[in-house]
Structure formats: C-alpha cells, structure tokens
Image: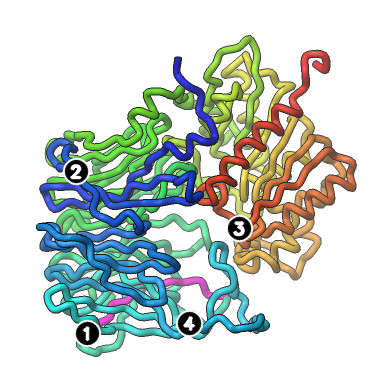
C-alpha cells in the first residue's frame, strides 16, 4: 500500500537545478535537506548525456554548492560553495583532477560568469566590511531602504568588485568596482554586461538598468536607455558580442507590469520587446515549496537570431523559442502540464532541462530541438514517488466576481471516505500562481484526509496583464469573492466535502487574505494565518518593502491613514469568530512578526480562540527554505490545529 506523505519527507526530496552540458555529460546541482545538520546541502553531479548513466560527483563533501558555470571550451567547471562562514570559488578541470579552491577571502564570492570565447572567469565579491566591534555599537540609519528580508540591516561602506580570473596563469585582477551593488551576467574580451539600480541615491526610484562596461575605458552604456524607468536584468551576449537579450518590464504599472524578453544592440540602440505581441509573463512565478538553488534564468540565445524564454501561462511554465528578427510565431519547445524549472543550451539542436509536475518532484531531461524528442536522464526521486500516494490536482474553472473566468485545482484526499474536510489554500504574492509543480505541503494535507482547494484569484500571475492588475487598489474585494466562489465550485465538484468542516490557510498575501476571510465570513471551522499582513498602517513603516509596496498595491499612502485602515483585517477583528492559529518567523522583515502579534492580540481581545507561534531564526522564507526542523514543526502544527478544531459528529 502506498504511503501517505509526511512532514519528514522533506528530507527525502532531491530537487535538481542549473543543468549545463559539454555535449558528452550533463552537470547539475542536486540539493537535499540534511536532518542531522538541520540545513540544506547541495553538490555538483554529472551523468552521461546519452542515457543518464555513470553518475559522478564533482564537488567536495564539505562544500555546499550555490552556483555552477561551465567554460565555453568545456575544459573547466566553476562553482561557488560555502566553506565555513563564507562562499568561495572552486574550479575543477574536466579532464581529470580534484576541485581547487580559488578564493579564500573573508567575503562571499558569487555570480561566476565565463568569457564567451576563452577560459577566463569573472566573479564578484566585496571589500571594506567593518570588523565586528568588541562591544555593541548603535546602528545609525539615514536611508529608507536600510533592511532586507533574509539579510537584516544592510551593510554600509562596502565596495563591490568584479574580478577576472585567467585559468591559464591563475592571474586575478579587478575589472569593475563600484560603491553600489551590481550583478554581472555576461562577459567578452571587450567588456561586461551588468545590471544595477539606475538611480541608487533616489529612494523613490526603483528602476534597474542593464549596462555595457567596455574594457576600452569608455563610459558605461545604459542598454535600456529608451526605457530608463523600466526594470531590466539577466543580460546575455550573442556569440558575436554585439547584441544582448535581457529580461525586463517597462514599469507602466509599478510591480505588476509583465516581464518580457527584450533585445538591444551593445550601443543601447534598437531596444525591442520581442514578446510584445503576446500577453504573456516571461519568468517563473509558480507557487511551490520543493525547488532549491534554481538559476532563475528566464531568457537565453539559442542561436544568433533565436531566443529562448521561460513563460508562465495558466499555471504552467514552458520553454518557448522565437525569432527576434521576423514575425514568425513563437513555438513551444517544452510544454504540457508541468513546469520547466531550469535549462541550459548545449548547442542549437540540444537543450538540457529540469522539470517538476504535480506528482514528480524534480527530473533532468534533454530535448532534441529539431525533432521535439525528449529523453529523461535522471529522476533521483523515483523511489520516493513510487512508494508514496501522490495526488494530481483536478483542474476546474468557474465564474468569479463579475463573471471573470477563474481557474483552480482540487486535490482530493488520498483515502476515500463518505465525507471529509477540505482546506482552502491561498497563495502569496499576490502576483504568483498555483499550477503544475510538486507542492509537498499540499500532498501532506491530502494524505491526512483533507481535500485541498487551490485557486488563482484575480491579481495572480499567468493570466495576462489585465488579470494581474485587477487587484491593485482593490485588495479584499474581487479577489475575496473569487475565492469564496471557488470554494462553492469545489463543493460542487466533490460532494463528499463536508462544508461544515472547511479550513483556510495561506502565507504572505495568502496570510493577509486568511485574515480578511477570518474577519469577513464565518463559513470556516478553522484557520491558520502565516507570515501575514494585518495592519497596513504599521506595515508601511516596518516592512522592508512597506513604504513603496503599500502605495503600489493599495494606491494609498500615509497621507490617508483611514484608507489604509479600511484595507486592514485588524480593523474588522471584532467580527472574527473562527479559531485561528498565527504562525510567524521572528526574523521576517517582509511581513514583520508584529503583524502576526497585532492580529493575535486583536483576536484575544475579541474573545476568539487563537494561538501565536513564533519561529526563531526564521525569515519570510520559512516554508520554502527555512530551518528544516522548523519547517517540519510548522506542517504538523497546521494539521493539528485543523484537526483539533473540526466539529465532531456530536457537534454537527
């Protein structure tokens, strides 16, 4: 009999990422959660490109790999990995020999990028870090953007460097140095492509530009100068070095303008949105909890005139190819009910990729571009998947608010019973989407006897620009109605759901919506709010993004406190009746723990059964990349709260 998914199964999952190939072997990063060390670990492996055989490890056992890069000559494999307190650079010759640690500094190394036609590597680091004082000292802050989730208070006084490393003579030299952070994404013997904040001293400007830095000494060129207010990144050079493809948005609607693929000449002319004719989001905003260390590369050159894009469409993430020079339609290379999580170009006819589906954690495959034939190479989760009862969500659609077509997926419980409870799970964002990827938490709830209802309400990603912007200035309106109508549709889909045993949960925006549901309906028997927003007034001044995210999303600022209060679930807390569990990380700077604490106190004062659980050393990413023991604890508490507060037979 197949086993039900358990919280501890997190330690069994093996997600794959960052595949690259020299035409003979495929190299990739494989991650897992180590229960004894209570942390995520990762290593570089390779298999034969023909059939996935001959698995080999390339990284030392004590190095936790972060990023991977294969030299154009296919002679060297570079990777960054954490050793002790810092991330260092390693190099391994592919014709034999052990990995060599290239850097040993007291600052992290990141972003290894090879020159297009040489065994020359560029990497980034910082200097000028202030030594830890003997005694505590005050932090003096004079900027609005002074903290960041996952980082804490931002360091001051750093110098950011890009360093060139020549494999032939092992020479290292600084080729770019700035007082503000930047990110190198491509290099040739003529210069670098990097992205950075366009106006770093303007605290209300959020544009990012892609720049060409010539080694000849000419001034850096803003490549998106025709759209300077946009946000651009991921610049990739053609083999000839004269053009760049990049990922970006024009910011005509702050935060929610669709990301598209763009091309531009190296002198900043001929900027072109190559996906302009399609109402599509380039990128991967799929809400899942199973993937680790993805490259987050969404655009690439397949040939000098053909571009690859990862596109998020109706809960799918597919790989698409199109010409940048003629109006030929785009062609889906890797589609279907799945998400392509990462990819690497081997040559014009070969692409290696990783994928996930609702019932497959992570697999490595190879595509023949000409024939469309795919071959699976590696599935490190095959045994786990064979032994466990995994549920594929049943797609359903319904008429939401204003009769908008809304899509959702219903995961029935593993074991059939005459009646059963169900959980409405609300995604975060709101500009993300549920869809065709492996979501461990949903599988766990289905294995515990719950039907799980996942819905993509208005405001989410992958349904076009108008759908995504529909929630702006309208939180708690059409989105709330979409969710309630979606629950009705799920009840009609599965008559075994006992509507007296409905539960609701969600995190971030999903936590806000759980709080909103808590204070605007009594149809749910139990609720769990995670990393939530309850008070937009206090969020404005305490969140790392509060001072700009709030006016972007609500179209309100501190000049109208009453409007912010109207959007706040806390304003309606006296209407709450449903027992609610509050989960929050103490180091969450995105939705600070005070948001959960305020709602907890409000519920207590309103006489509603509630409990507050604070997770130490936990940021906004607790459920996806937090400490493993706390991730397990979190899952158990959610299920236990639901179980404890479902009405029993004598109460129904």
Q: Which circle, 1 or 3, is nearer the viewer?
A: 3
Residue 460, labelled with which disc? none
Precedes in sequence: disc 1 or disc 3: 1
Q: Which is more toward the observer, 99 or 319?
A: 99
CA distance for labels 2 and 1:
38 Å
Magenta region, mostly helix, strand or loop?
A: strand
Task: Please name which of the two marks, 1 or 4, marks the residue nearer to the observer.
Answer: 4
Q: Is residue 86 visible?
A: yes
Tell me where the magenta segment starts and ends, as one range: 204-214
- 514 to the left or right of 316: right
Which mark sits nearer the N-terminus, 1 or 4? 4
Q: Nearer the viewer, mark 2 or mark 1?
A: 2
The residue indicated by pointer 4 is: 129
The relative height of residue 575 versus residue 296 in the rendered view (above or below) is above
- Quarter of the figure that contains the N terminus: top left
- When the figure is inspected, residue 503 is found, relative to residue 195, above or below; the finding is above
Residue 47: image tag: 2
**Label 2 neighbour load within 10 Å: few <14, some 14-19, many 20+:** many
How many angstroms separate mark 1 from mark 4 (CA)? 27 Å
Spatial separation of the CA atoms under disc 1 and disc 3: 43 Å
Provide the residue designation for mark 3.
617
Please state the horizontal and vertical placement of residue 169, each as a whole percent of the image. 13, 78
Which of 425 and 105 lies nearest the eye of the viewer?
105
Secondary-structure class at tag 2 = strand
* Mark 1 secondary-structure assignment: loop
């Amino acid at each position: 009999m197949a086993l039900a998914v358990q919280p501890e199964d997190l330690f069994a999952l093996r997600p794959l990422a960052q595949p690259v190939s020299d035409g003979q072997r495929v190299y990739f990063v494989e991650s897992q959660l180590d229960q004894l060390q209570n942390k995520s670990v990762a290593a570089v492996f390779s298999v034969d490109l023909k059939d996935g055989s001959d698995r080999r490890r390339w990284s030392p056992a004590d190095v936790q790999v972060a990023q991977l890069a294969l030299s154009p000559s296919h002679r060297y494999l570079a990777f960054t990995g954490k050793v002790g307190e810092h991330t260092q650079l390693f190099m391994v010759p592919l014709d034999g020999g052990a990995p060599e640690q290239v850097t040993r500094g007291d600052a992290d190394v990141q972003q290894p990028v090879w020159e297009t036609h040489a065994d020359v590597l560029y990497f980034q680091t910082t200097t000028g870090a202030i030594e830890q004082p003997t005694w505590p000292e005050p932090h003096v802050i004079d900027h609005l953007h002074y903290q960041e989730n996952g980082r804490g208070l931002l360091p001051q006084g750093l110098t950011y460097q890009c360093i060139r490393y020549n494999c032939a003579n092992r020479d290292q030299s600084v080729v770019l140095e700035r007082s503000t952070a930047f990110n190198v994404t491509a290099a040739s013997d003529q210069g670098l492509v990097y992205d950075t904040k366009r106006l770093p001293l303007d605290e209300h400007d959020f544009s990012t530009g892609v720049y060409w830095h010539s080694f000849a000494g000419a001034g850096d060129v803003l490549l998106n100068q025709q759209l300077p207010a946009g946000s651009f990144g991921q610049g990739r050079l053609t083999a000839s070095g004269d053009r760049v493809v990049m990922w970006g948005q024009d910011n005509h609607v702050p935060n929610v303008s669709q990301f598209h693929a763009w091309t531009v000449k190296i002198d900043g002319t001929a900027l072109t949105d190559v996906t302009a004719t399609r109402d599509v989001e380039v990128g991967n905003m799929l809400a899942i909890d199973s993937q680790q260390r993805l490259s987050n590369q969404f655009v690439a050159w397949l040939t000098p005139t053909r571009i690859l894009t990862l596109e998020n469409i109706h809960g799918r993430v597919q790989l698409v190819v199109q010409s940048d020079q003629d109006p030929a339609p785009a062609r889906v290379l890797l589609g279907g009910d799945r998400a392509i999580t990462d990819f690497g170009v081997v040559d014009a006819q070969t692409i290696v990729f990783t994928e996930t589906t609702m019932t497959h954690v992570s697999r490595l495959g190879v595509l023949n571009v000409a024939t469309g034939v795919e071959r699976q190479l590696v599935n490190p989760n095959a045994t786990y998947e064979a032994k466990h009862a995994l549920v594929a969500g049943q797609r359903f659609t319904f008429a939401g608010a204003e009769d908008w077509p809304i899509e959702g997926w219903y995961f029935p419980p593993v074991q059939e019973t005459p009646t059963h409870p169900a959980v409405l799970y609300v995604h975060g964002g709101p500009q993300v989407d549920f869809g065709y990827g492996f979501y461990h938490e949903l599988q766990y709830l289905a294995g515990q006897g719950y039907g799980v209802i996942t819905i993509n309400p208005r405001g989410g990603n992958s349904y076009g620009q108008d759908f995504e912007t529909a929630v702006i200035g309208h939180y708690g309106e059409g989105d709330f109605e979409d969710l309630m109508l979606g629950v009705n549709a799920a009840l009609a889909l599965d008559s075994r759901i006992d509507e007296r045993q409905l539960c609701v949960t969600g995190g971030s925006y999903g936590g806000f919506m759980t709080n909103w549901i808590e204070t605007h309906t009594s149809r749910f028997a139990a609720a769990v709010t995670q990393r939530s927003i309850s008070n937009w007034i206090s969020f404005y001044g305490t969140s790392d993004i509060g001072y700009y995210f709030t006016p972007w999303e609500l179209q309100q600022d501190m000049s109208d406190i009453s409007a912010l209060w109207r959007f706040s679930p806390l304003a309606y807390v006296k209407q709450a009746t449903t027992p609610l569990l509050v989960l929050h990380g103490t180091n969450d700077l995105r939705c600070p723990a005070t948001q959960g604490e305020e709602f907890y106190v409000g519920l207590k004062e309103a006489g509603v059964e509630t409990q507050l659980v604070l997770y130490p050393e936990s940021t906004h990413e607790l459920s996806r990349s937090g400490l493993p023991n706390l991730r397990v604890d979190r899952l158990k508490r959610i299920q236990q709260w639901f179980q404890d507060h479902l009405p029993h037979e004598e109460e129904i």
